[in-house]
Image (cartoon, helix red, strand yellow):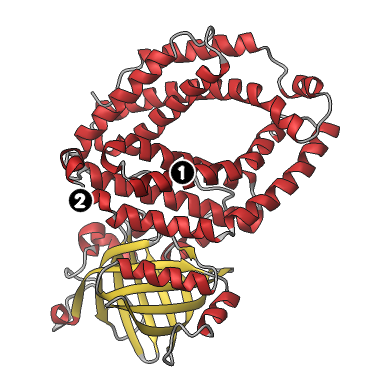
Amino acid sequence: MNSKKAPGSISSVVTMPDEVELKLTLSPRHADVLESAGLMARTPRKTRQRSIYFDTSDHRLLQAGLSLRIRRSGRKRVQTIKAGGAPAAGLFARPEWERAVADDTPVIDDTTPIPALLGDLASGLAPVFKVNVERRAWDINEGGAVIELVLDRGEVVAGDRRSSFCEAELELKSGEPAALFALARKLDAAAPVRLGIQTKAERGYALLAPAVTAFKAEPVLLNHDMTAARAFQHVVRACLRQFRLNEDLFLTGHAPEALHQARVALRRLRSAFSIFRALVDDGVGAGLRDDLRWLAAELGEARGIDALLERAPSGALRHHLETARQTAYVHVDATLGSPRVRGLMLDLTQWSMSGAWLAAAAAADVRDAPARVFAGAALDRLRRKVKKHGRNLAEADDPARHEVRKDAKKLRYAAEFFIALFDRKRERRRYRHFIAALEGLQDELGNLNDLVTAPAVLTGLGIGDPPDAMALLFPGSKTKLLDAAGDAHAMLIDAARFWR
């Protein structure tokens, strides 16, 4: 490990401005289709690359949102350090530190952020995985912008584990970011492409971790300097990332939990539109929200069957539900593979980043408000709704209890979105108690909702004798569930508000 300043090292290091690129994923077959579609008129630049990624044994760089690689292309080696920042979906903008190096030994000096981060631990940096890539690149003029289009076919190798990938990266060299999306839509018209959400470094680190069947929501990395508008952008990207991670998992393995978490991501995203309505209540945003509602409904039948299967004992009922799930999953596959869903992911990314809502004069004050101030007001408003509408759960009818359930979900998601803005020790302690109480209420209301909706699901599946099936699926009484929900509501209202 070279940790000294070499002569001339400062001048040999380039701190790049934030690069803006849109990442897309596609199959190798569809990459071949794109190349033959006539969109890239010139002969591509072809290179073979081998990258070695470095980290400490306990992955300190990963935890700090940094990646360190040395990439060899021909005889040239370039060391690159990238700062990932908050997890994003599709659109990546991040600073880089680049320098030429003589061999596969990292050069770590004070021109990079690593010494300040690791101190003496920098000497423990070692290879953790490799990425081998066959790259083809074109420069494309799109709407007055110059975009470098790169097609990468490659493999990530970590020990005896490996994973192949095929992706396109559209990097903006000059012009407006809207051109990236215009080109992406042209590519998708020629061959299906999906919004990409994983860097090559993330693919490598995934190989080092145990295999997962679903991705739960990641923390939304907000800070006190953010405006409400910037906070909304971070929330949207985090939700899109959760959806796309689980969409890919479901499409490759039909994991029920991945489908569930994909729908959770959609609910979180729809809740964000509601929570931030004062900022984003324009025609485009309303249309996107309608599309999200449609997509959630299209995935709903399959998830409803999965929820019943979690309760069903072995026997004829379970067999019938498993058969119905296979049919429902075919529908989910077709929905997720549709141009409408692929386009929705691009539309959401573009609109959240540069939509007209960012310049609407009527919403300027709330849009530019400090995120923490906005968050406190939103959390107060949502808590009041849950408190008011949940007072008499036992006497309320089923639709009214369902509305309380939806209000509780919005409050839960808002709390998770905004917790990074309330980072004092007391606030964190109160948050844990508040979320525990809120989870308790959600669980009880969810049980009641399952009890109410299950007969219609069973009838729709052609399962005879729904009452007999209900007795197997829900052996408890509704009265006990109502009592438990009332107790959970009281505990939530007694819990201290972490944002005050």
* Residue at the image position 64 percent from the left and 21 percent from the top: 452
Q: Residue furthest right?
A: 316
Residue 54 rendering spot, x and y as whole percentages: 38, 68
Amino acid on which disc 2 is placed: Ala
Point out the image quarter for the C terminus: top left
Per the rendering, the mark at residue 318 is: none
Q: As drawn, is 486 to the left or to the right of 1?
A: right
Q: Residues within 10 Å of mark 1 (few under 14, many from 20)?
A: few
On residue 290, the disc is: 1
Q: What secondary structure is marked by label 2?
A: helix
Q: Which mark is residue 359?
A: 2
Three-letter code, disc 1? Asp
- The front one of 423 and 127 is 423
Left or right relative to 138: residue 144: left
| Image quadrant containing the N terminus | bottom left
Q: Residue at x 65, y 26 (%)?
A: 453
Q: Is residue 64 visible to us here?
A: no
Of the two numbered discs 2 and 1 on the same chain, state the one appearing first in sequence.
1
How far apart marks 2 and 1 lie (CA) works out to 22 Å
Q: Quadrant of residue 68?
A: bottom left
SS for dot 1: helix
